[in-house]
Image (spheres, grey):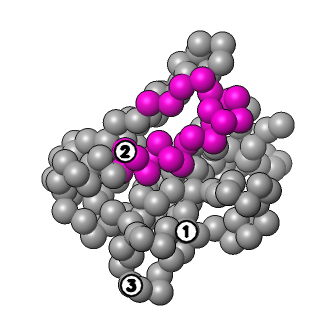
Amino acid sequence: MADIRTIFIDFQRGAEWLLDAPGLATDEGLDTAVILSLFTDARAQPDDVTPAPDDKRGWWGDAFAAPAADRFGSRLWLLGRRKQLPSVLAEARGYAEEALAWLIADGIASRVEVDAFIPRPETLGLTIAITRPNGEPVRYRFEALWSAL
């Protein structure tokens, strides 16, 4: 089943659907799944430090998840006001891996590798390598202003 083709613009403007007259473009690959998994705000866990005590975010559809532990999105949003330190890059990598783990669980990928890096000051970079079950590699690179997370 195809997804509506979604492209990531940046953290300030988010993502947009692409048009393909007379309707919306479709995505038969992983692009939309990866973008939505990484850049939809997952609900903060009880021990997460959030920007405001009552700001837990999360996707409303998680209330209907089956199984209940099947949550959507990533916790990358928690890093928006954090310093650019190696420990924070490790958290970014972990949050991205956590958000994409469902690809392996659902048999869509056999492997997901994530690297977080600082390509320039105030910018978070993510490179993602996904190996499909047939061995086909799919690669992504995202960069976003740190202060805009």
| Residue, disc 2 | 93
Q: Which quadrant of the rendered structure holds the N terminus? A: top right
User: Does residue 143 appear in this view?
Assistant: no
Is 1 positioned to the left or the right of 126 in the image?
right
Name the image quarter holding residue 106: top right
The magenta span reads: 92-113
Q: Is residue 34 above or below residue 54?
A: above
Q: Which residue is mark 1?
A: 43
Q: Badges 3 and 2: C-beta atoms under 8 Å apart? A: no
* C-alpha separation, residue under disc 1 versus residue under disc 2: 17 Å
Magenta includes 109? yes
**The disc labelled 1 sits on which kind of residue?**
Arg
* 136 to 108, vertically: above or below: above
**Residue of label 3:** 52
* Disc 3/disc 2 C-alpha distance (Å): 23 Å
**Circle 3: element type:** loop
Q: Looking at the picture, how far across and down is residue 143, in whole percent?
A: 34, 47
- Nearer to the camera, 58 or 68: 68
Examine the rendering and report whether any part of residue 34 can be seen. yes
Q: Residue at x 59, y 52 (%)?
A: 36
Residue 89 lies left or right of residue 140; in this view the side is left
Residue 149 percent coordinates (x, y)? 37, 64
**Residue at (50% x, 30% y) in the render:** 112
The local crowd at label 1, few if under 14, some if 14 to 19, many if 20 or more residues have their Cα within 10 Å, is many
Secondary structure found at label 1: loop
At which x and y percent is residue 47? Answer: 42, 71
Considering depth in this image, is 90 or 119 the residue closer to the camera? Answer: 90
